[in-house]
Amino acid sequence: VMTQSPLFLPVTPGESASISCRSSQSLLHSNGNNYLDWYLHKPGQSPQLLIYLGSDRAPGVPDRFSGSGSGSDFTLKISRVEAEDVGVYYCMHSLQARTFGPGTRVEIK
Amino acid sequence: EEQLVESGGGLAQPGGSLRLSCVASGFSFRSFSMNWVRQAPGKGLEWVSYIGAPGDDIHYVESVRGRFTISRDNAQNSLYLQMNNLRAGDTAVYYCARASPGLDVWGKGTTVTVSS
């Protein structure tokens, strides 16, 4: 089971924002990788990968997005939020069968 | 350009069947594991199924196990989802997505509506 907090996050452009994701099981594999991804789903678009393996930024993703954490506790940080960052953010574990978190809706104040 | 295009969605009656297809282009399809993800109206994303690159490692979300079958044809660059005994709760937009290891390439989705 994946949980996220908060579920709704109003943000001010230029400020930073953080989303927490917790798993009921450890996502740290014996190979040293944390099998946790972050996605952004904007209205009317397909979801896009932001972060994979806990902290690796996907190609083309701005460096204001960063992922951290290990085991069962992870955080997505958006520094200097921009208007285009609005949407629903999901964490997802990728150990064999996958599970998405419930999503965090980010809106501009 | 790396691309995935889904098709096969539509209206089905409860208990009916549909077969979704996803055609890949712009990359070596046979080298990547693939997934189906869905989003029901007003709900969040739900992972549905995974198939490894050779096609021998398969996983399903519990709610579709025994009703849905994922498969692939690497010679045709195609991914499939056979959906049987459909329920109203299966109504959703279905996306195929490449795993590399994150789900880095997504299709635009195909809509499945289960209703009498």
Image (cartoon, coloured by chain):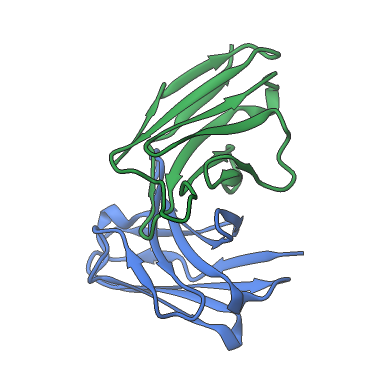
What residue occupies the far bottom of the structure in this picture? B75
Answer left or right for A93 relative to A86.
left
Q: Is residue A61 left or right of residue A34?
A: right
| Position above or below: A26 against A3 | below
Give the quadrant of the N terminus of chain A.
top left
Chain drawn blue, letter? B
Total tally of numbered discs in the picture: 0
Q: Which chain is green?
A: A
Residue A48 drawn above or below residue B2: above
Q: Quadrant of residue B88?
A: bottom left
**Residue shown at the point (58%, 60%) measured from the top left:** B100
Taking A83 as reference, is A53 above or below it? below
Q: Position of residue A104 (x, y in %)?
A: 46, 29
Where is residue A91? Give x, y as percent.
46, 39
Q: Nearer the viewer, residue B63 or A96?
A: A96
User: Residue B79 location, x and y as percent?
Assistant: 51, 75
For the point 72% across and 32% down, which residue is it?
Answer: A63
**Residue A48 vs residue A80, the one in the foreground:** A80
- Quadrant of the snapshot with the C terminus of chain A: top right
Could you tell me which residue is drawn at 44 percent across and 65 percent down? B10
Q: Is residue B53 above or below residue B41?
A: below
Which residue corresponds to the image point at 65% horizontal and 12% vertical from the top-left? A15
Q: Toward the viewer: A8 or B87?
A: A8
Residue B43 pos. (x, y %) = 38, 40
